[in-house]
Image (cartoon, coloured by chain):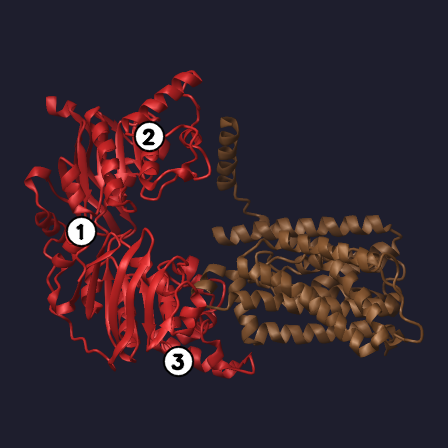
Amino acid sequence: MSETISSAASRVALRASGKPKPATFAMYVFVGLVAALVIVGAFTTQGFLTAGNFRAIITSAAFVGIMAVGATLIMLGGSLFSISLGLTTALTSIIFMYALSLGIVPAMLAALLAGTLIFMVQGAIIGAIGANPIIVTIGAGAIQDGLIGWISPGDVVPPPGVDIDFLARTYFNLPVSVYVFIAVAIVTDLRVRRSQFGRELYMLGENPRAARAAGLPVERLTITAFAVSGCCVAIAAILIAGFAKNVNLQVQGTYTFDVIAAILVGGNAVTGGRGSVGRTVVGALVIATISDILLLLGASTGMQTLVKGLIVLVVVVLLHLTQREGRAS
Amino acid sequence: MSEEKALAAEVRGVTKAYGPIVALSDVSFRLRLGEIHALVGHNGAGKSTFVKVLSGVVSPDQGEVLVYGQPVAFKTPRQAQAAGIAVVEQELSLVPALTVLDNILLGRVDPFGGQTRSAFLAGVQDLLAQLGLRDVRLSTVVEDLTMAERQLVEIARALSRDARILILDEPTATLGESEIERVFAGVRKLADKGCSVIFVSHRLGEVLDLCSQVTVFRDGRMIASHPAAEMTRAGIVELMLGKVSEKAESAMREGARRDGLVDIDGLTVPGQIKDFSLKANGGEIIAIAGQVGSGASEVLRALGGLIPQARGRVTIAGQPMRLGGPQRSARAGVVFASNDRKGEGLFLQQSVARNLLAVRLKAVSRFGFVSGAKAATLARRLAGLIGFDEKRLGAAVLTLSGGNQQKVFLGRCIERQGTQLLLFDEPTRGVDVGGRADIHNLVRHAASTGNCVIFVSSELDEILDLAHTVVTVFAGRITRIGRRREMTAAGILAEITSGSAAGAAP
């Protein structure tokens, strides 16, 4: 036992003494490197510099982007993210499909309501009792996983006679989802930067103790951030349903990770208080571009996931180090 | 010669400056073997710097330190520890979730000091017994001990490292009457065994009770050192204060007076505040004077809604206010400014303008959206009020000096719609002389608009300059409430250090 104690003490000592000064520099090098790779990839990869491919990139960024824009609020407010985001996507898309028998508008309302509520409850638990967001959202994920297995063990398709093709239709060469992405980004960005809610959310994320002492409505802010994020998940889930035509548990895909990756690669602070919707949009586009290049190069989905994982890890480490340098100087 | 030998530690002509601020100036000090030696002085007297010099945390600019007759020059606390000096801080450093033994072993380079495990354990048991902790087992989890027992375990931990010179820094600030007796009994036993003790305290009653020698510091100088038997509380207070001019009440007009704006009845926080009652008017500035650990800060924190266990009836502008929720306090018109402006006050990465508007966004918003023009106008107005260059409103608060940060912090609180009561905890902590005057004006301005201001300060000058009414607290109780003109610096200091009147609240 005493050995563990002294080794812990030496670790602490190491951390205190070894301050890597050049982390900010490394950050710039990394960002430059990724940019260079994208540019080189762009020019050397067959078929990259075509209008069709750009459409493909922005289209594939749209689903992730819509959800990431919403989830940015959670991170800005200092509650990290929802680990069960992908499962909520699957569940709300299934609810949407089922509810289509009531009509398209009721189905949309049902999905939006479900997504918003599922996230709100998580936000309430985190905001009101200060529970750990990771644990809460993992727990919520297990519940949703079980729920999906219970209500729809297999594929769900639209009821006969109901046409949801308009959800995947293209206007001016771009699918509906891209326009929705742009609209969601603009509205959320305005809200974050201009509204009282947005300003207070930044304060909560930067210094929760100060926000509490100042009497800011910390619980309400957290709940609202989650609610907006859940609503965005439902919006994406409706579009995904329109795109896929049949939905099941597999709809979750890698959305949870992709959303977190987009937020982090955009450079939003994991600890909250710093970042913007704009950063997340850039992050979503960068991730989509990298996936696209890998796809064009014929890389497997495994390879794509691996590269995305590496990028996220490097960004997280470098962001952490640059922030520490910022505090030290 | 023989006297030299009897000295455990001697400090000769030590000077230490931090930049332009001289914390210690030509200080000499002698600690005899087996002596319990009190070190007293008001805030900023240099006590803590002195303790840091002895314990190797800072090196003196001039002068020498001798331990058992040998000159030493500690570069690190570890070297001081090796020379047999141990400091027991006011804030306990025990880990509550670990056992007594784990805590004693924590941080030791060589766990059993070259002895066998059983010999070491027997030694530790013996130490605990000497301190009167016979019934505390090594396997007891620290959480289950009383505060006094924890303090004694902390001392045992220092002694288990062969400390022969023990520095106790405000060891009783958080203890109750009977617990203090237990700690004192333990300390006396140690002294009987030849251990020398430096006892740093604000509580003069205890000092005279426990110590054989009393040394008084003031403004970084050693002012006097006498046997305790020759000293009285009043005499020590006089030495601590020096020739502070007893200022006449400065020209203070109470602003728009609103009688009975704030009524606090029986405010209690278990273990910290006992039955605090106070009636205050709008336009009035009230100072709560008390030493660290006296409960003064906690009164403000409780009113700000930050202490869930707080009980008591509080009425503000005729409306009862429930305690225990910061948002409830805010809605009732209470604005609280913590003494920790970085940790619990400002949003350092955000701009000055945003910080100034942090708790009044509603006033500049329409339909939930902040109007840029209105926000800018209000921010400029507030900047003018706090004397801050409006060209720098866009700068991150992080980049400002401590004084300017504090101005922004207090500026955030003033002139806010619906405010009734402002609570400032140590409003000028870490602020230079020029900045202090500005902040004092801000506090007066806040009261002049009809709000009630209650502030806590450990600086007598500040209390005498600002307050219309002074409340003194000791050990969680009010010892006196008086108008400013009835109070003197010596009177306040006597109230907050002696505790003679404890329990005799009016």
Q: Mark yes or no: residue A105 visible.
A: yes
Gap in angstroms between the C-alphas marked 2 and 3 = 57 Å
Which chain is represented by brown in the image? A
- Mark 3 residue type: Arg
* Res. B132 image quadrant: top left
Residue under numbered circle 3: B381
Q: Residues within 10 Å of mark 1 (few under 14, many from 20)?
A: many
Q: Is residue B63 visible?
A: no
Q: Earlier in the sequence, mark 2 or mark 3?
A: 2
* Whether marks 2 and 3 lie on the same chain: yes
> Circle 2: is it few (<14), some (14-19), or many (20+) Cα within 10 Å?
many
Q: Are marks 1 and 2 in contact (CB under 8 Å)?
A: no
Q: Residue furthest left?
A: B230
Type of the residue with mark 1: Gly
Whether B64 is drawn above or below B231: the answer is above
Q: Which chain is red?
A: B
Structural distance between the alpha carbons of marks 3 and 1:
45 Å
Residue at 28% over, 52% down: B292
- In-front residue for pair B55/A238: A238
- What's the residue type where badge 2 is placed? Ala
A37 to the left or right of A140: right
Residue marked by disc 1? B499
Decide: marks 2, 3 in contact (CB < 8 A)? no
Q: Residues within 10 Å of mark 3 (few under 14, many from 20)?
A: some
Question: Residue B156: which numbered mark, if any?
Answer: 2
**Residue closest to the eye, B461 or B156:** B156
| Disc 2 secondary structure class | helix
Q: Residue at x 60, y 64 (%)?
A: A275
Q: What chain letter is assigned to the residue under label 3?
A: B
Q: Is residue A259 left or right of residue B353?
A: right
Image spot of residue B274 (x, y percent): 28, 56
Q: Are marks 1 and 2 on the same chain?
A: yes
